[in-house]
Image: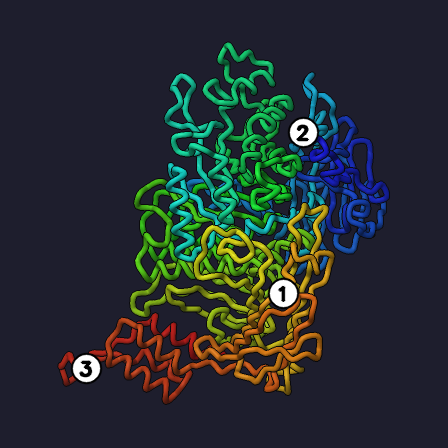
Amino acid sequence: MVDASLFSMAALNAHPAANPDAVLSGDHWRISLITDALIRFEWSDSGRFVDSPTQMAFNRDFTAAHGDDAPRFTVVERDGWLEIDTPSLHISYNRKPFTKEGLYATVKGVATIDNTWHYGDEQLRNLGGTYRTLDWANGRIPVDDGVNSTDGWAVIDDSDSNIIIEADEVGGHANPFGTWVVPKPEPTTDLYLFGYGHRYREAVHDFIKLTGPTPLLPRFVLGNWWSRYHRYTETEYRELVGRFEAEGLPFTTAVIDMDWHLVDDVDPKYGSGWTGYTWNRDFFPDPERFLHWLHDHGMKTTLNVHPRDGVRAFEDAYTAMAEATGVDPETGEAVQFDLTDPTFMAAYFDRLHHPMEDEGVDFWWLDWQQGGVTRQRGLDPLWMLNHLHYLDSARGDAARSGEDDDPAQRMDARPLTFSRYAGPGSHRYPIGFSGDTVVTWESLKFQPEFTATASNIGYGWWSHDIGGHMFGYRDEELEARWYQLGTFSPINRLHSTDSPFNGKEPWNFHTEVRDAMDATLRLRHALIPYLYTMNWRAAREAEPLVQPLYWDYPEIRDAYKLTDEFLFGTELLVSPIVTPIDRDVQMAKADAWLPQGAWFDFFDGRHYVSKPVDGRRIEAWRGLDRMPVFAKAGAIVPLQELPEAGGADGGRAGLNSVANPEALRVLVFPGADGEFTMVEDDGAAESAVRTATTRFTWNIAGGTGAGSASFVIGAASGEAAGDPSAIPAERSWTVVFRGMKESAVTVSANGSAAVEAETVYDEETLSLIVEIPPTPTDETVTLTLTDGASVAENPTSADVFQVLKDAQMYYLTKEKAKAMVDDLGVAALPGLATLEDLHGVDESRYNDSHMPQSVIQALTEVLTRE
């Protein structure tokens, strides 16, 4: 049954009325100072204002909701005008109906000539938020506004929102949900001004305080997802999963598209088979058996639904639905899909979705594509679906056969849905499905920007069709680059159409591409400990995983210019490759901007020095095997170890396992001290979760090469520490000091007991690797590097040779270029372009020489890293 407590005001944690000490009002106007930079402006012809939660805004009193200090402000009345001054803004208002001339605010502390907002101003320099869908988009599209702007102000208009109220009845029908979404009693103007200047991160934090937190996601969603619009049978899907396991390719989520239900078998008298709730037993003879089998292999399952056409007489659940909604089943009349009727929606969950969840469906892919109209004025069906489905998915009464003996069968304790974006506040209902993308380089190029700017509206968990869904063309290099972007995306979900030429399985591609795909899929799964810690950061600190660079560097122009570069958590900067390989150099490039400081290639340890205060731009050239990912000096990135292949084992040691791992590999980068606290938990509902944290501390002893250095793995702490059902009692560790010179290493536990460890050095990745056998997780492990933590010298000569070796060019020119670089080093760069044969007196063609520009550019990166 629908659980009303999940939809209550308490569950929403709503504090919708503003702090009365921070409210100014007249007969028809009201100004609420939520913070000294976040202001709500209301106009009501009747003099009645909205103090209920809206579809967007849940909390307008940050003191009551979050314990914040009340906003500071002063008010002066002068010549009929109200002058409001705060540390962030000065507001002027003539206390009349809102006009451009009579209401304006000036943002303080931002050096721009357009830092004054007038009511009704167009937001010309808004940095963007996100958009409902990328359906049919082939490249860059406009996005809706976010809360950040280079002018220092942004406005969200909430005037047309519906409100959320407690209601025992709706439209004469009993309301089992307890709360419901209804139109405002009368039209009002309702605006929120974000006047944070260039304090972009703070603006997003307060937006999330206003609208509600980003929930803590279940761990499994951070692995790889397999999705395809294809008529799978149970046998075919089992074979597919078995092949993935044999190939050592981990997947944690099975996305079953619409053909799980009856489609072509629907009699045309009922319409199309687009909407359906009845399993196609020809494809899946025993759905429960199939879903349980997936769980045993470490995979959760989501089913695609298109609910628009309601429930028709051919459905197994028709009679139950008809009786529950007052339709005589003998008539065969369709039960209409009506999001505004709580009677229908209660039956929709209780009769359609909950039984299938009890069979083993873990969450729902709400593939709504049928417009924005319901029977209720201003209510977007997509928003209502997201709201109700997400809250309902927290139900605690799911009962699955065998779950007591087989924990893999249990429904995850955390709510989850998978649907398109439905406006500001949608971050409360993760995960976002960005729609059906076109398979082109243009689509790939826009996805990094689209993901990063979504953070400006707090929307951090986008899932894109990695590899592209439809149309377009076959380009194997494009697919490899898309897979690599997927690894460093919020959610990594491969997807494609049913075309026999468009399958995304890596074995459908040639060897070099396949190897790149395999490696990046395995890397994504290995990253789960890092990603899960960032999941906690998003939930507790309102910090999305993917962020635009200008959040950290708002006064540096280059931070705004390279729109496909982004921060990936606290430790990494990603510059994806979104253009094809240059034939001459056999590499592709990403235009990258490195902020001031030292940066290290995540994969091979080469270091880059960015000395200018404003950072530096580089061209980062990479082969098909990887893309540019940079770790900051002192970065610490925990990874989990993966078996080479796996079978039917979703447990801690299995290939698809998302349990807190028994073996961890920690990448540590030199150049600065560092700290990182890895967060794990017991997987319980967010309100009851117990955590275990492990703190890593990296001390390079005051400077590169200055005496000994130490890396400390702290004992696990927190409520879940010491509980072997939550984290292992023992763990083996592999600590990889990447980009660092060799050093002698000693390892001790709890400050005294010596630990036998193996140490090797990998010249290819400039990595000192320390293998530590299993040690208790309640003990502190200390690695002492007695020769210090010196940054390894970049192997410039070897890297120059590799660029020239792979280049498609004259051998003679390669030899001349290598000799010039060996003699002159970086000073050779101006002369490389002169390596052209001009055909003088000697007309022989044997001495032809040509130096491709792209090869010069790739050599420039190698020679100017420091």
**Image location of residue 488, percent across then percent down:** 50, 58
Q: Secondary structure at mark 3?
A: loop
The N terminus is located in which quarter?
top right
Q: Nearer the viewer, residue 778 or 151?
A: 778
Q: Height in image: 706 above or below 577?
A: below
Q: Residue at x 39, y 61 (%)?
A: 516
Residue 587, given in percent of the width and then of the height, sits at 36, 67
* Up-down relation of residue 489 to residue 696 (above or below): above
Task: Using the numbered discs, state the Cα–Cα distance from disc 2 to disc 1 in whole angstroms.
Answer: 50 Å
Residue furthest out toward the bottom = 823
Circle 2 sits in a helix, a strand or a loop, which is it?
strand
**Which is closer to the viewer, label 1 or label 3?**
1
Query: Of tags 2 and 1, which is closer to the observer?
Result: 1
Q: Amino acid at mark 1?
A: Glu
Residue type, label 3: Asn
Q: Label 1 neighbourhood size at 10 Å, few (<14), some (14-19), many (20+)?
A: some
Q: Dot 2 corresponds to which residue?
A: 181
User: What is the C-alpha distance between the residues marked 1 and 3?
Assistant: 65 Å
Q: Which residue is mark 1?
A: 730
Residue 704: horizontal and vertical position, in percent? 60, 83
Q: Which label's residue is closer to the chain start, 2 or 3?
A: 2
Q: Residue at x 78, y 56 (%)?
A: 87
